[in-house]
Amino acid sequence: METDKPHRRKGGFLATMKAVLWSFFGVRKRADYENDAANLNPVYVIVAGLIGAAVFIGLIMVAVSFAVA
């Protein structure tokens, strides 16, 4: 018997940040990916991706400013 309740995602924001940071390196195991896909909140994934991209761009800008100086 199926219920009409949506699936409650258990992954917290820190778990999402960890998954996104490992994904930036491209070193996720298939089992970890499947676990993330089943448990992480999609809104958290988007926010964590934006934060990760902003930090990455900031690090590149700092590295370039040191290289140019």
Image (cartoon, grey):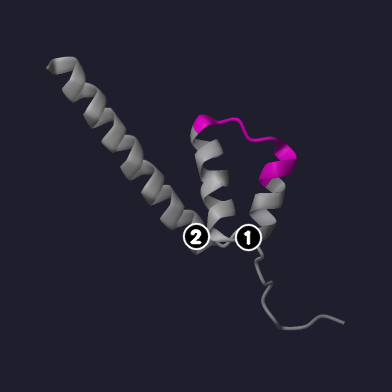
The residue pinned by badge 1 equals 11
Q: Position of residue 67 (x, y in %)?
A: 19, 16
Residue at image coords 32%, 44%: 54
Mark 2–mark 1 Cα distance, whole angstroms, equals 9 Å
3 in magenta: no
Q: Is residue 46 left or right of residue 58?
A: right
Magenta residues span 25-33
**Residue 2: quarter of image:** bottom right
Q: Is residue 66 above or below residue 43?
A: above
Q: Residues within 10 Å of mark 2 (few under 14, many from 20)?
A: some
**Residue 9: quarter of image:** bottom right
Residue at image coords 34%, 41%: 55
Q: Position of residue 56 (x, y in %)?
A: 35, 36
| Quadrant of the frame with the N terminus | bottom right
Q: Is residue 41 above or below residue 6?
A: above
**Are the residues at dot 2 and dot 1 in contact (C-beta closer than 8 Å)?**
yes
Query: Between residues 16 and 1, which one lies in front from this camera angle?
Result: 16
Q: Position of residue 18 (x, y in %)?
A: 55, 45
The image's mark for residue 44 is 2
SS for tag 2? helix
Residue type for callout 1: Gly
Residue type for callout 2: Tyr
Q: Position of residue 12 (x, y in %)?
A: 58, 61
Sequence-first tag of 2 and 1: 1
SS for tag 1? loop
Q: Which residue is situated farthest in the right direction here?
A: 1
Residue at image coords 27%, 37%: 58
Q: How many tags in the picture?
A: 2
